[in-house]
Image: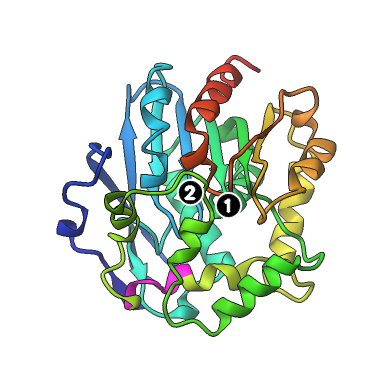
Amino acid sequence: MNVLRTPDERFANLPNFPWAPHYLTIQDDDGTDIRIHYVDEGPRDAEPILLMHGNPTWAYLYRKMIPGLLATGRRVIAVDLVGCGRSDKPAAKDDYTLARHYDWMGKWLTAMDLRHITLFCQDWGGTIGLYLVAEHPDRFDRVVAANTGLPIGEGESDFMKMWVGMMNAATAFPWPMLDQGMENKLSEAERAAYLAPFPSPDYEWGLISFPLLIAVQPDNPGVPLNKAAWEKLQRFEKPFLTLFGELDPVAKGWEVRAQASIPGAQGQKHQIIPGAGHFIQEDAADELVAAVTAFLSVS
């Protein structure tokens, strides 16, 4: 597998993102080394809050939340999925499969040896993060799911049909979709920060492939993996909170299923946040930090 690595100079002077990069190298089953980036702030012996982003973003998405979460005294970790941010980027579309994403991040999680985790996950960070919870429930103390889900082949929404069809033929990521996913519009410098990991479309195959891996079609190869994970999540009794944006067209409705089916979701203070779009971290960072801070005391 050929792997691309974004030059460090692309990440110079990012607005409101002062945190030093950290890296851990895992190995794909074919023997390829893959370096994964993460922000790691706060006391190393404190219980961690793990932040997982979605497509096409990276840890920069959490810049508004990290300071408030650090104020809780916890260790705060924001990881970049493979193909995103400062993490390595396999160079071919066919390099990306759902099974590989699960394997890559599972290897990262176990190598980091994180325990007593509070997970905050959104979009693909949620799909992958929820799979990790299902596979490693002993490592997680609580979960916050925001604008995400674990699809099990039950069909596509009109939005998803459009999105998958568009990306099936794409050779570059349609960056205007980023702006459409948030109500608080980005400055030019912030938008440049989101694009920084991708010097050219050659680096974007991970972003392009994500929509094709969403296991909404019954014959999608990821359906068996997600069904097995969903069965395990329906036995997850630790606290599980949903925080969804009122204006999100992507994952709308999955929070209802989670609340009804995951034991740990019973009796929690779930929220639909007014005026927030898909990239809820951009639109409602203060509300999210307040909800997560309160949730840390739930056991």
The residue pinned by badge 1 equals 123
Question: Mark 1 or mark 2, which has the lower sequence index?
Answer: 2
User: What are the residue bounds of the magenta stretch?
Assistant: 202-207
Is 134 displayed left or right of 75 in the figure? Answer: right
Is 74 above or below relative to 211? Answer: above
Residue 299 placement (x, y as % from top left):
65, 18
State the SS at label 1: loop
Which amino acid, mark 1? Asp
Predominant secondary structure in magenta?
A: helix
Residue 68 placement (x, y as % from top left):
41, 23
Q: Quadrant of residue 216?
A: bottom right
Residue drawn at the location 57% of the way across and 81% of the way down? 168
Residue drawn at the location 37% of the way across and 70% of the way down? 31
Which amino acid, mark 2? His
Tell which of 123 and 187 is nearer to you: 187
Residue 53, label in figure: 2
State the SS at label 2: loop
Quadrant including the N terminus: bottom left
Q: Does residue 204 belong to the magenta stretch?
A: yes
**10 Å neighbourhood of mark 1: few (<14), some, or many (≥20)?**
many
Residue 15 placement (x, y as % from top left):
25, 43
Is 80 displayed left or right of 292 in the figure? Answer: left
Q: Quadrant of residue 35?
A: bottom left
